[in-house]
Image: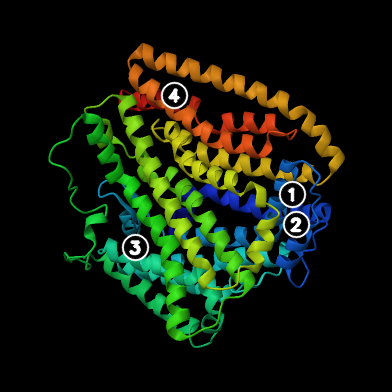
Amino acid sequence: MNTPATALAWELWRRHRLRLIAIVGLVLAFALVYPALCTLAGFNPGSPDALEEMVKRAGLINNAGQWLQQVVQVLYLLFLTCGPAVGMVLTLLFVTWMFTFTEFDPRNKDPMTFPARLFTLPVSTPFLFGWLFLGGMTAIIVLYGCWVYWVPQPHVDIFGVYQNCFGWMTLLALAQGIVWALAAWPTTRMVLLMALLFCFLGSPAQRDIFESPFVLPPLFVLGTALAWAGLHKMRHGQWQGWPWPWPFAWWSGRAKMRGPKRFASPAQAQLWFEWRRFARRLSFYAAGLVLVPVAIHLLVRFVAGLGPMQDDTVLGFVVYLLFMPPALFFCFAVAPPQTDLPFVMNRPLSNGGMMMATLKAEGIGALFSWLVVLAALCAMPLLGVFQEVDQFSSALAQHRAIILLGVMILSWRLIAVSLGFTWSGKRWLARMPFWLMLMAYLGGVTLAMLAADDATWNSFWRLVPGLLVCLVVVKFLLAFLAFRLCLKRGLLAPSALQAWLAVWALLAATLFIPAAILFHDQPGFLPLSLGIILLTPLARIGFCPIALAWNRHA
């Protein structure tokens, strides 16, 4: 490297090149394809109230058509309304995290460790701070400008606060200040980061406060000062944390792993270990991200005497609650700690036993997370009128039960089908869940485009049963080969295989029975049944013990 700035740029590119390419591709896709999708659906992104137009067009969907076409069209309208804003928020949040310049440290299990190797570069602390701080601000401004000026942004009041470039710059300054200044206090750092995220995501509900000129500028200056002091102290080793008796330290991943003194079997011990290792933390994160915003808004409304939320704000809040568990489970599925398995591989248990314990712990975490979401949804009418939500959900009134069961099982499935990739120990395989999710997203957009035209949809619909039958046959063939190899090599006990097949049949029946009750007399019942069989994980579960054995004995 000719200059230190080139070395820092190469370090940033080496770590995040695939993610940066994905961001550029996402922005270009929205800039080039999104207007054509709006024209195809007859949706006007420049309307004064995009949510009202979405609800109006959802009510015009032909109820005499096929039920799957109706569901796809409603979801397609939701994507056209919220897609650009959600894409902008997610990519800007990623850039904010990227310029905190943290990484997972396998030695102390800290997911937000600042790499000490940067302090060995022959540069001064002001230069290092200036490059990270100003580089981050420049990236925020450029990415924000691309989203605002290249991509048509539908007018949705709840997303109006997020279209403030200085707000994003303030978020980056505060994130850098908290991460760097509290490097020696990881628990306090995580609590403050979650509080910062809560306040930022909940800013549309208190728009007058966050749009005040006396709020963002002082916070920006405070974040800048904390970031400078934190980076300077870290480089000179002047931050030394002290133990603090947290009142709820028993749920933290850093607390002592207290549990029963004796277990009835190694399988029960492994189940407790997997629950303690990550499933419990995942459940508490879901509870915090779901219940805390609702509790804060309830407290602010009834204590401060504020009026009810607007209809579109309540609708956005409901979408956030329903979106949070699947997004959180997917982030945990591809998180770096999931690939850190040296201690796990030393456990005195077979590969199949580890797999079954992990699946059980994930199932308990998913059930707990969705119970929390349902409790939060029950409290939402206290915040405002549910008129917009009722109008939007009326188009899916007959399908609510199976959709709710589907998203609950889907949340658990996101981690279950990723185990084989993360347990392989190969970095290129560990990235596969992300690319599979991207392919599924592109497939959903393609399906929505087909649903917009009745003639094209009918032609495609005639091919669906045969295609799904072929996929089901391939799925069962791969599952047979995987489980046969596991039994032959002794990676999976016959009793564990029988238990998983029973669980698989139960999960499939949980979705199939409501589908049979609702859609048994409709032409799409056969494709729906085959889709349920495909979505219930079987073959990739069979490859999990093989991947773990590959990593364990490599």
Marked residue nearer the N-terminal end (3 or 2): 2
Q: Residue at x 25, y 63 (%)?
A: 184
- Name the front one of labels 4 and 1: 4
* Amino acid tagged 1: Gln
Secondary structure found at label 3: helix
Most extreme residue toward the bottom is 214
**For residue 40, side relative to residue 392 (left or right):** right
* Amino acid tagged 3: Met
Numbered mark located on residue 58 in the image: 2
Q: Nearer the viewer, residue 241 or 525?
A: 525
Inter-mark Cα distance, 1 to 2 = 8 Å
Q: Number of numbered discs present?
A: 4
Q: Residue at x 43, y 73 (%)?
A: 296
In the rendered image, which residue does mark 1 sit on? 73
Inter-mark Cα distance, 3 to 2 = 41 Å
Marked residue nearer the N-terminal end (4 or 3): 3
Q: Say if 359 sits above or below 120 in the image.
A: above
Inter-mark Cα distance, 4 to 2 = 40 Å
Inter-mark Cα distance, 4 to 1 = 35 Å
Mark 4 and mark 2 in contact? Answer it, CB < 8 Å. no
Instruction: Pinpoint residue 363: horizontal percent, then vertical percent.
Output: 40, 41
Inter-mark Cα distance, 3 to 1 = 40 Å
Secondary structure found at label 4: helix
- Name the front one of labels 4 and 3: 4
In the rendered image, which residue does mark 3 sit on? 190
